[in-house]
Image: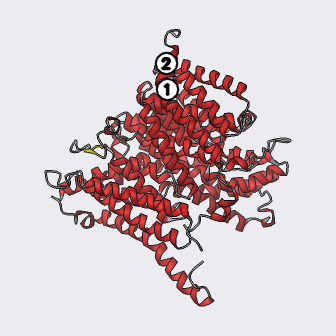
Amino acid sequence: MRAPAGQVAVAAGVLAIGACVLGGSFFLPTGGGYAQVGPGVVPRVVGAVILVLGAFLLAEALRGGFPGVDEEAEAKLPMDWTAFAWVSGGIIAYGLLIEHLGFIFSSTILFVMVARGFNSRRYGLNIATGLVLASAVFAMFNYGLGLTLPAGVLKAVLP
Amino acid sequence: MDVWAQLMHGFAVALTAPNLMWCLVGCALGTAVGVLPGVGPAVTVALLLPITTKVDASGALIMFAGIYYGAMYGGSTTSILLNTPGESATIVTAMEGNEMAKRGRAGPALATSAIGSFFAGTIATIGLTFLSPLVVELGLKFGPPEYFALMVLAFTTVSAVLGESTLRGLCSLFLGLAIGLVGIDNQTGQARFAFDIPQLLDGIEVVTVAVGLFAVGETLYFASKLNQVDEKLESIKGSIWMKAEDWKRSIGPWIRGTLVGFPFGTIPAGGAEIPTFLSYAMEKKLSKHPEEFGKGAIEGVAGPEAANNASSTGTMVPLLTLGLPTSATAAILLSAFQQYGLQPGPLLFESNSALVWGLIASFYIGNVMLLVLNLPLVGLWVKLLQIPRPQLYAGILVFATMGVYGMRQSAFDVFLLYVIGLVGFLMRRYGFPTAPVIVGMILGPLAEEQMRRSLSISQGDPMIFVTHGISALLLGLTLVILIAPLVIGYLRKRRDMPLGATGEE
């Protein structure tokens, strides 16, 4: 049976995380002092264990796959990359826009993009719903609970 | 008895108007997020953590706890009416409950699960009331080595016992431990893994991780994989009340489910999946109508629902008395305590007894509220299930990003949220459990502190963990839990070998 490429990649990712943690631990002092154990000891142990776990994962993946993960069943539900991209794009756009457009418009854009990811093309409805929801949350948090969400381009018009 | 006085004191706290209101808000919110697919109690409590700066400790904690056990009630409604279960602990309910609903018996299924949840929740709260002082007595004798050993045991059971793969559970746990390392070491002030990024110096917030893994990861997964699967919402036809026959068949399973669920919650094995499956198997064996199982047997709803609620209340025992969280939501509750500078554990029962007992008393009140919310008012929650998926998930992400951005007003956190969401997506896709990540990142720093404290007591001698009796016992138990499945697996393989298997599947 061929090794599932995705699983091999996941195992490699775990190995990489382990290597980073272990590598990083060498920049931290491990010993001495009153506490006997420095701040580097636990990272070193954690990093080493992650490397070992990653190696076991890799072995499992190469020997036909993780037990309990049914790649055949997964293949019957193919990845919808368009949907994935819409949802991802929505969150990234939110991160890029929040400090410029403000909370209400960034959230509306996020709302429309995520809904599109779920195959909703009723843009008018989604823009309206997003605007109402975001405005309600904004009002509740900024005027009710005293948290400050950014007003952005609406700074001049909002109280 | 002293417990009575303490409990009455607790009721005096819980029955004040603001605390009753927080309890109701928590139970209602909990039911709502339990009903809604795509969002659960862990995310909700995490997103609400910022209110700890505005609300007093008892009010906020009463609400958070209400969300936790309220979600258990709400989750069963979804499992019964929808063919895709909302919470992992209600998978079993989904099997029988959904079958009952398909046969026009949604009403009795909802009733037996709500009344069973109430019964189990109340009995488990009584258990919590009387067991806690005993565990506190024991906990007071524990020093740093014992606590460290206990935490190691909790780590192991949370990651190794749950889920289908010990290896993947441990990967999740250590990922959580690694996340917990980021930031300033609270004993020496040394920055760890911050890569000179100022936002990382404060550590990675549990809000970002919980919301990323659960809300963002789940949304990505649902959008790209499950959106193709059709969901069918069953309607509630006829009366929701149970007939005499239904009562007769439910009482036994409720009692047995509670008896199975509560102990599982209290030992640091966490999670409600195992007791629900055990209860289901038990009812199937004991039932006079085994032929109905798989086609909508009421016992198969009553038992697991009781087990699931009893065990979620049971997890409060280690959380409150020893500061050990054994589920994702319990871990986030622990961090809610920390927001107030409180550390759950035996000392909290002495220093903040009004708070702790007020919280325990609120469980009694909350269960009554939930019974009313979930039985006569069930129609209200069913309306939530009619929200179309695109708008539901879009709305969830608006709240998710708001919570994470609003916490520190930092766009960096939004990108971090997305990265953690990607990890959550991969974990979901490749069968890694997510709860150990949260438990690891919150309990990890505490365990490290206890370990370093122990070693400074012993002047660096690691033998302190084995020379202390209780600590040695707990570490031994941990080893058994880790090694036993390997040995059993090896023996099974050896036994099966001659039957023509080559060892490869």
Residue B201 vs residue B428: left or right?
A: left
Q: Quadrant of the N terminus of chain B?
A: top left
In the rendered image, residue B348, in percent from the top left (x then y), is placed at 36, 41
The residue pinned by badge 1 equals: A98
In the rendered image, residue B42, in percent from the top left (x then y), is placed at 52, 42
- Quadrant hosting residue B214: top right
In the rendered image, residue B422, in percent from the top left (x then y), is placed at 52, 47
The residue under the point 36% across, 64% down is B474
Of residues B331 and B204, the one nearer the viewer is: B204
- Determine the secondary structure under disc 2: helix
Which residue lies most toward the bottom here? Answer: B498
Q: Is residue B478 above or below residue B188?
A: below
Of residues A159 and B437, the one nearer the viewer is: A159
Q: Quadrant of the C terminus of chain B?
A: bottom right
The residue under the point 63% across, 57% down is B257
Amino acid of disc 1:
Ile
Amino acid of disc 2:
Gly
Q: Earlier in the sequence, mark 2 or mark 1?
A: 1
The residue pinned by badge 2 equals: A152
Of residues B234 and B298, the one nearer the viewer is: B234
Q: Can residue B7 be seen at all in this image of the molecule?
A: no
Query: Are the residues under badges 2 and 1 in a single subunit?
Result: yes
Q: Chain of mark 1?
A: A
Q: CA distance from mark 2 to mark 1?
A: 8 Å
Which residue lies most toward the left here? Answer: A33
Residue B194 vs residue A65: left or right?
A: left
Q: Are marks 2 and 1 in contact (CB under 8 Å)?
A: yes
